[in-house]
Image: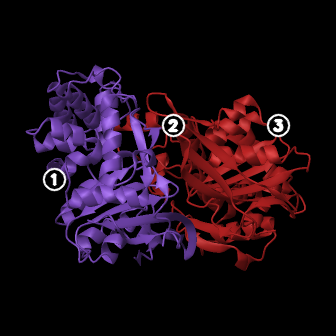
Chain colours: A purple, B red
Amino acid sequence: MSTHEAGRVTFTRGGLPESHHDIHVAVVGVDGQLVASCGQADLVTFPRSSSKPIQALPLALAVPDLPDDELAVACASHAGTPAHLAVVQRLLARSGSTASDLQCGAHPPFDADAAAELICRGEAPTALHHNCSGKHAGMLLACVQHGWSREGYTSPDHPLQVVIREAHAREAGVPLEAVRVGTDGCSVPAFALSLTAAARLFARLAAPQGEHAQALQRVFRAMAAHPFLVAGPGRLDTTLMPQVDGLVTKMGAEGFYGLAVRDTPHGPLGVAIKVMDGAERPRPYVALAVLEALGVPVTPAMQDLAPGTLRNWAGREVGSVEAELHLQFA
Amino acid sequence: MSTHEAGRVTFTRGGLPESHHDIHVAVVGVDGQLVASCGQADLVTFPRSSSKPIQALPLALAVPDLPDDELAVACASHAGTPAHLAVVQRLLARSGSTASDLQCGAHPPFDADAAAELICRGEAPTALHHNCSGKHAGMLLACVQHGWSREGYTSPDHPLQVVIREAHAREAGVPLEAVRVGTDGCSVPAFALSLTAAARLFARLAAPQGEHAQALQRVFRAMAAHPFLVAGPGRLDTTLMPQVDGLVTKMGAEGFYGLAVRDTPHGPLGVAIKVMDGAERPRPYVALAVLEALGVPVTPAMQDLAPGTLRNWAGREVGSVEAELHLQFA
């Protein structure tokens, strides 16, 4: 079941396939069992930023009255617009921290307008503009609330990161040793899991249960309520979530995508998608193909997120995009 | 010979392969015969901008005294810096044309500083900033010199494009029908060939021969003399060409790469590389692996173009990059 053919998104030009992306998908139900898959469901890989909803659990547990917008930005890979930065700063202030406490590094805002504004003002990007600054602000607050030192909060040995790794194992239903440890782009540990295990994390978000059901429920609600804060202008989490009731999605680097889908003919489902070459562009095509295969109605507004026609700089039609995804049901 | 294993560039995080890119390569000698390959040498695909040296042949033939810098920018996918635009405008003026005659469309300069400058001045990008504006300016001049109308110069039926398609067939040693026609990002025809045939185009540049040897020789000389004009700050053509005597390279969209290498133990060679998913990042790794396999010394300065260590935003080592390319010699 875990070794059948991978999916593929093909970009065609003038009738000739020009480039393609190989895709693996795992879909699990509330019982943690594989419902459907495509390619290697047992592929072990890093969800990267798709882990953020789980990384936010210690924060949600420690601050039961945290406003939804701040919880959403703690789960975000945000675009660095002023609207995002305002919420990050509010979250940061709760722990008496400042931007200089953030250990994420700095990069220009993902949002082109926000990046241009900085350049025109002659300002360098700061840690606040880093897409993970909300996660880091949330981690600092979690440390303070749990009574852990803020020093070294990014180290795999820090109590916060130990707890986050345990949360991955617990919610995915795998032994701790099955959660492999790397380092993320923002210097906190990145945890690797099989696609099936990663899909279970999203099934837990879709249908919270267990000891931390309430915290999972709050994370789902916060992300669903604030799709803009979770990503930003034109980014897929922001544009797709509002299209489907009871859908929470989270993009991760290197072509990872996690979806928590509440209402399907199969019940609530968790989905984990990996684009093997790490590309971003196949993501909407794969997401819609998976949702459709799972019986979630795909509307014209959703189709607009994954245009089948490829156009050039002058707007001229030059090719097409096609997703071939033979989801095998278990 | 054309069906052995594809090459692969793998990005690893924390000891775990995270993403990979599949690669096909063809290497041919001056006689047009396959010298070595990796994966499918008979893969038919679009060289895209790697076709520019061939697309410039009607220009080189029509204007024997065209300065090298203008010929280089006609072969360029340039970064839109002021230095590039100055040469494009000089070339454009030779045919009495203006930016409004360019049919390439407009996009922001590839160079981040040049793009930011435009935004800060509140100006929209024009056709001049399009990476193909030099090619289009050269096409307009070729039309005027050959006595063809500038009207419709991007159409596959226009005499200029018919001649360019014929040039692809002639220099690649294939029938005209083997040169398939699509539309490029800048609205001129894009021509598809097998990797072997595309490699022959670069072998012709490395060791010009035939009716148009002199024009091919001038294109090689112009590109080798002006690596900055061919691409721009930090871009691979610009950084790699000066590292090897007698090397001309040309990047194309969707992961294509063409190399004309004059001095190897196998004699002059043409190389065509296709990254199957269209990614840019594997290109330096593949180019160096191929050059090394062909007996071209790879210096530390060249190695710097393809770092084996993957670092995050904070400069911390998080993984590695490895190219596995088993070039099979014919």
Q: Give the answer, above or below, for where A32 lies relative to B313.
A: below
Mark 3, other Cα within 10 Å: few <14 / some 14–19 / many ≥20: few
* Label 3 – label 1 distance at C-alpha: 59 Å
Could you say where residue B250 lies in the image, as x and y percent from the top left?
A: 67, 50
Name the residue carrying label 1: A217
Which residue is outermost to the front? Answer: A175
Q: Secondary structure at mark 1?
A: helix
Q: Which residue is mark 2?
A: B81
Does residue A105 appear to the left or right of B93 in the view shown?
Answer: left
Taking A62 as reference, is A53 above or below it?
A: below
Camera-near label (3 vs 1) is: 1
Question: Do we see residue A315 in this rendering?
Answer: yes
Residue drawn at (39%, 29%) of the image: A157
Amino acid type of disc 2? Answer: Thr
Quadrant position of the C terminus of chain A in the picture: bottom left
Q: Give the camera-side residue of A83 and A297.
A: A297
Circle 3 residue: B297
**Badge 2: chain ID:** B
Q: Are dots 3 and 1 on a single chain?
A: no
The residue at 64%/38% (across/down) is B306
Q: Position of residue A317 (x, y in %)?
A: 44, 71
Residue A117 seen in this snapshot: no
Distance, label 2 to label 3, CA atoms, is 32 Å
The one nearer the camera, B103 or B243, is B243
Horizontal relation, residue A270 to residue B220: left or right: left
Q: Nearer the viewer, residue A65 or B265?
A: A65
SS at mark 3 in the image:
loop
Q: Position of residue B209 (x, y in %)?
A: 88, 58
